Image (tube, rainbow, N blue to C red):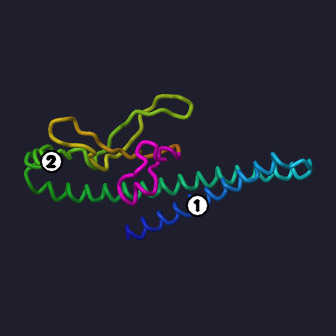
Amino acid sequence: MYFRVTLFFLQSITETSEEIANLKFTLSQINTCLVEENDQSKCTELLSLKKDLEELVELKEHELLACRKAQLLAEVGSLIANNQEESNESHEGPLRSDISKNSSDGHSFVEQRCSVPGWTSTGKFIRQNALVPSVVDYDGNTPERVRVLLAHPTRLSEVPCERFFETGSCHRGIRCT
């Protein structure tokens, strides 16, 4: 069932992303027409159409953000459920051996909740809830670097792209949106 939900979200995200790209392309064509148009009545119609398209793009971006957020919440829910199942199984064994096993692996942070610093669009400093899905670098000698996913992203730029959900990484790195 989880795979069907993920597949649905990926299709929905891809379709919405394509719609946004098409709308932005149409918007750029309207801007070009506005520059070239001399007739005032046609310019008024084009300006009205431009305004409507900008609103539609904004709505589609909010829809995409909501879809990605739902996908992240579903993924976090499954990780938490798996973590609870594993913790129920681990309560049968001694606690100290479990702790030493995690710290010797170097993956003691995986599936842990944390708080990360961030800024709002108005420039206020806040701390946001996040989940650690994986350890990026661990060689035993240097401090661990982890990848975090925000639990409640508020901007489109805070949500990982489709490639990240499909493969676990994105070739664009920090420029990924």
**Residue 65 position in % (x across, y down):** 53, 52
Quadrant in the picture for the N terminus = bottom left
Magenta-drawn stretch contains 53: no
- The correct choice, above or below, for 148 with respect to 117 in the image is below
The one of 73 and 142 positioned closer to us in this rendering:
142
Of badges 1 and 2, nearer the viewer stands: 1
Dot 2: what SS? helix
View extreme (top): residue: 124
Specify start and end residues of the magenta stretch as a single range. Answer: 156-177
Left or right: residue 44 versus residue 166 is: right
- Residue at (92%, 47%) from the top-left corner? 40
Q: Amino acid at mark 1?
A: Glu
Answer with left or right where residue 7 lies relative to residue 168. Answer: right
Density class for disc 2 (Cα within 10 Å; few <14, some 14-19, many ≥20) is few
159 within the magenta span? yes
Does the CB distance between marks 1 and 2 fall below 8 Å? no
Q: Earlier in the sequence, mark 1 or mark 2?
A: 1
Which of the 4 image quadrants contains residue 92?
bottom left
Percent x, y of residue 90 = 15, 55
Secondary structure at numbered mark 1: helix
Q: Is residue 50 left or right of residue 116?
A: right
- Residue 45 placement (x, y as % from top left): 85, 53
Mark carried by residue 18: 1
Percent position (x, y) of residue 19? 62, 60
Which residue sits at x=61%, y=56%? 21
Residue carrying label 2: 105
Along the line of sight, the residue nearer the viewer: 44 or 97:
44
| Residue kind at label 2, given as amino acid type | Asp
Q: CA distance from mark 1 to mark 2?
A: 41 Å
